[in-house]
Amino acid sequence: MIRIEHIFGSRAGSIIRRWTGKISEINRRYATPKIQMSRGVKFALLLLRVYLIVLVLLLGYKFWSMLSGGSI
Amino acid sequence: MDFGSTFFYKYRRFVKALKIYLILAGPGLIVMLADNDAGGITTYTVTGATYGYSLIWFLLLLLPVAYVVQEMTVRLGAVTKRGHAEAIFDAFGSFWGWFSFLDLTLVNWLTLITEFIGMTAAMSIFHVPPILTIAIVSVVMLLMVLQGRYWTWEKIAIVFAVLNLIYIPAAFLVHPSVGDVLGQGLIPHFPGGFDSTLFFFLMANIGTTIAPWMIFFQQSAVVDKGMKEKDIPFGQLDTLIGSAFTVIVAIFVVVVAGTVLYGMQIDSAAQAATIMMGINPWLGTFVAIGLFDAGFLGAICISLSSSWAFGEVFGWAHSLNLKIREAPWFYACYLFAILTAGAVVLIPDAPLVLITLFVQVIAVTLLPAALVFLILLLNNEDIMGRYKNTLAQNIAGITIVTVIIILSTLYGISTLFPNLIGG
């Protein structure tokens, strides 16, 4: 089994392991949203997701058009 | 009682009230005056140079906008005793938590760069080299947090916040026509008709009124200050006074620019200060000091809002009341943000204009989420108890949040695609 320490060295590997462990712990701690998921909350979060997807698509389009010869 | 005694009595009462307020004032005043950061001052200067006094009425509308949003952070912080980053993780889960936290970290760091750009540009007017400005600013910012007390940090920050009012004496130096300011400025109208340029300026002005870091900063500051539910009315007053000051400063910046620079093509506040230095050295000096102070205020608040968010999310000790050895990661984040942002400004040929534009775009990915979470949290009875939003607060809050989201999004998109809105 390949351990992270084999790739990054023992010191960097243990730091990375500590950080990933911390992030996993945070993810576990906040795995379940505490707010009551009423219809209004669900709708607001859905709108937010759609908004962000559209924005990311626009950013992606801008990035692509810059790469293909446009300028900001 | 004769006139002299009455006057003295009233004067003493006023001074006493002012002293009490200055002891109690804090997050609201600081966050609101820091809202007039380097980017904000640039926006108001360009607005004044382009439209004269004609959009002052619009700036007045920003007072309730700023107050309504920031007042919610006071209640949320005082009731939950948690910063906004932690509150989002806890209420909405790790996906939205990480999204908000990473987005905040990125946008704060980019905004911090723009504050350093503003500070170095302002000091270059006094022939201070950028590296010296950044070194001194970094040391002062470090000393401010290392003294180990939130209260002391807050009072030092208030001194810098009050310096933001330097635009008021600056306006008296340019002798604006009061009749013109009131006549043109207070009657709502769209100078030259409602076209795409005017729309861009309206979006820019509202876009600078509420920034994501302000929500995170004030809520964390309320928690670090140890405000409780009983302190909410005081926090609301503090926020209201701060909102009034932020609008007053914005108006005076517009008055200065509208009087001296009207009709000129102005791209930045630093350029405006340089021109004003040629017209009246005192005026140029005041405006340059104002720009430097704006950048400094923004920088101290933004870097702290990131450090608090890191502490909240990773569970590290995160308070200005703690010494370095008690909260090493908190101070390490603060130092890292300052040093890296300062270093970027010193890189020769760094794309600083692109970074400034990028801030506006990235901010619109975070601001709507932060505002929506704010409204949802403030409506949750389990979290807020009797301090949850009332119907009137919801009507005002949701209306304002919707307008901010629409206008700031259009502003961000128009930055990405300059010809999209109205050609």
Image (spheres, rainbow, N blue to C red):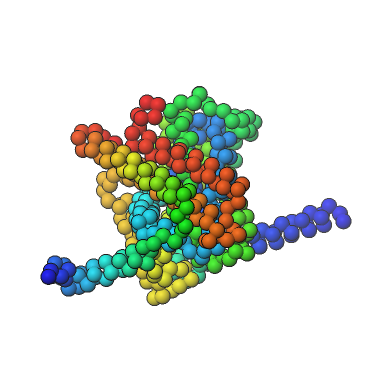
Residue B223 seen in render: no
For residue B88, side relative to residue A20 (left or right): right
| Number of numbered tags placed on the structure image | 0
Image position, residue A36 (x, y; %): 47, 57
**Residue A6 occupies which quadrant of the picture?**
bottom left
Image position, residue B177 (x, y; %): 61, 32
Image position, residue B24 (x, y; %): 61, 63
Most extreme residue toward the front is A39
Q: Does residue B145 sit above or below B53 in this rendering?
A: below
Q: Nearer the viewer, residue B1 or A32?
A: A32
Residue B81 seen in render: yes
Most extreme residue toward the bottom is B325
Q: Does residue B216 sit above or below B270 in this rendering?
A: below
Write the residue at 38% across / 35% down.
B414
Quadrant where the C terminus of chain B sits is top left
Most extreme residue toward the top is B192
Q: Does residue B224 sit above or below B61 in this rendering?
A: below
Quadrant where the N terminus of chain B sits is bottom right
For residue B236, side relative to residue A47 (left or right): right
Image position, residue B214 (x, y; %): 47, 53
Write the residue at 46% across / 44% down.
B208
Write the residue at 50% across / 51% down.
B375
**Residue B399 occupies which quadrant of the picture?**
top right
Q: Nearer the viewer, residue B407 or B25?
A: B407
Q: Nearer the viewer, residue B201 or B13?
A: B201
Write the residue at 52% across / 26% down.
B191
